[in-house]
Image (cartoon, helix red, strand yellow):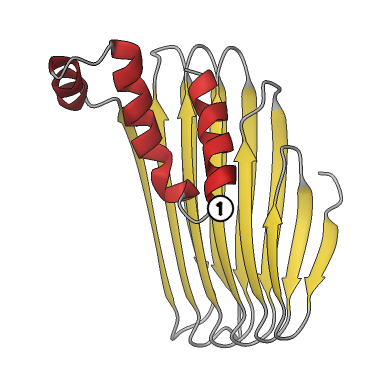
Amino acid sequence: MPTLKNIVVGEGRSLAHVGAPNEQLRFVLKAGAKLDYFLPVLDEKSSKTHVVVELQGEHSSVNSHVVFFGDKKQEQTLRLEHIHQGRGTVSSLVAKGAVKDQALSQFYGLIKMAPGSIGAEGSLHEHSLLLSPGARIEAVPALEIEHDEVQASHAATLEKVDAEKLFYLLSRGLTEAAAMELLVEGFFREALEGLPAEQREDYYSAILKKL
């Protein structure tokens, strides 16, 4: 496994970071530090990405959003870990991904409550959309709890395009392509809503080009 590059966020500091495919990073958060991390994996190449966030300082926090889309014969492997070490730390991870054609996407999400993380809170949500019968997607959420008095939750869903919603949009006069665009845009909305409007539209455009 490649060595992870370290980025330290100092006490009381805030950092907003936009990641990239094949990124290998470890963030270390000191007391009161805050990280907003966004990872888009939307290009045409296969990729392997591994990001670890260590919440070492008390009351540090991280909010991570991941968006990925695999098509053709593309292979994507994404691993994102939130490691709670300090007291009263808070983390949230939302991952939204879609696959079509013969693509394979794998997403591994982890929340770990290490010894000493009393009062920590963490949540992990992975939602996947299957657009072709030949495509594959694997979502593996995991919790590791090594301390009492913490709160941690995870959820994962795998769905296909809702036939009833698609039929409704077609009945309103939309073409199938336009209807699919609306449904896919709606699926990814939660993971993109925190971005500036111009940046959000750029990512929507990249997603829609893959349809």
* Residue drawn at x 61%, y 63% as measured from the top left: 36
Quarter of the rendering occupied by the N terminus: top right
* Residue drawn at x 61%, y 13% as measured from the top left: 73
Tell me where residue 146 appears, x and y as whole percent.
54, 75
The vertical placement of 121 against 65, above or below, is below
Tell me where residue 124 appears, x and y as whole percent.
45, 58
Side of 114 where 140 appears, left or right? left
Using the image as rendered, state which of residue 10 and residue 85 is in the foreground: 10
Q: Secondary structure at mark 1?
A: loop
* Residue drawn at x 78%, y 54% as measured from the top left: 25
Side of 126 where 182 appears, left or right? left
Amino acid type assigned to the residue bearing label 1 in the image: Pro
Q: Quadrant of residue 49?
A: top right
Side of 202 where 133 appears, left or right? left
Tell me where residue 10 appears, x and y as whole percent.
78, 80
The vertical placement of 73 against 98, above or below, is above
Using the image as rendered, state which of residue 188 and residue 61 is in the foreground: 188
List the residue tagged with mark 1: 196
* Residue drawn at x 63%, y 19% as measured from the top left: 74
The vertical placement of 70 against 8, above or below, is above
In this figure, what is the number of numbered marks?
1
Q: Counting other residues with Cα less than 10 Å from the Cα at mark 1, is it few (<14), some (14-19), or many (20 or more)? A: few
The vertical placement of 56 against 105, above or below, is below
Q: Quadrant of residue 20?
A: top right
